[in-house]
Image (tube, helix red, strand yellow):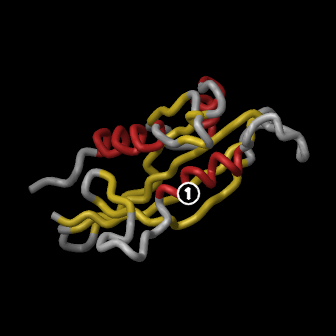
Amino acid sequence: MNYVDIDDLQEAFRSLVAGVTIGDAKAFRDVMTSHATDTGQLLEEMEAAAPPAAIIGLGDVEYDERGVLRTLRPVIVVMDVFRKGGIRRSSGVWTLAGAVEALFQPNLAAVGAYREVSGIEFHLSGLQPLALSERLAAVAIALEGVEYI
């Protein structure tokens, strides 16, 4: 048995996030996966995206001492054009973040309390606003899941 392929995992997240709606409309115009390893690369990808957008990246992978489990920490960055407070022409970056966050909130009434992606249960580990650009507002949604061989 092998671990889930990282590209396949990112694609599963991309598909899940692309289906997010706010009201009757799709929340994101653009949803992409990223292999960025630093903030500059991420900013370059964000500038190329059509907001509102989401970018799925892999934040961190950690293996146990025997190599039979790995902890995955994907990050979903949601972004939109920055708008001054009080202007309600569209939902805004925190509404977008909340819609994605809702996908991963536990359902304590269900047997599997957490959202599964590629057979791995993921839970929320944090939300962090990103200071990347004066033009764009962005929030990183950090997740964590453990995969066993």
Figure label count: 1
Q: Tag 1's secondary structure?
A: helix
Q: Residue at x 39, y 38 (%)?
A: 15
Q: Which residue is mark 1?
A: 101
Q: Nearer the viewer, residue 36 or 15?
A: 15
Is 78 drawn above or below residue 147 in the view shown?
A: above
Left or right side of 26 for 121 = left
Q: Position of residue 10 (x, y in %)?
A: 37, 42
> Pointer 1: residues within 10 angstroms few (<14), some, or many (20+)?
some
Q: Residue at x 9, y 56 (%)?
A: 1
Q: Nearer the viewer, residue 18 or 69?
A: 18
Q: Residue at x 66, y 50 (%)?
A: 139
Q: Is residue 91 in view from this perspective?
A: yes
Identify the residue at the far front of this view: 24
Identify the residue at the far left of this view: 1
Using the rendered view, name the quadrant where residue 128 is placed: bottom right
Q: Position of residue 42 (x, y in %)?
A: 58, 37
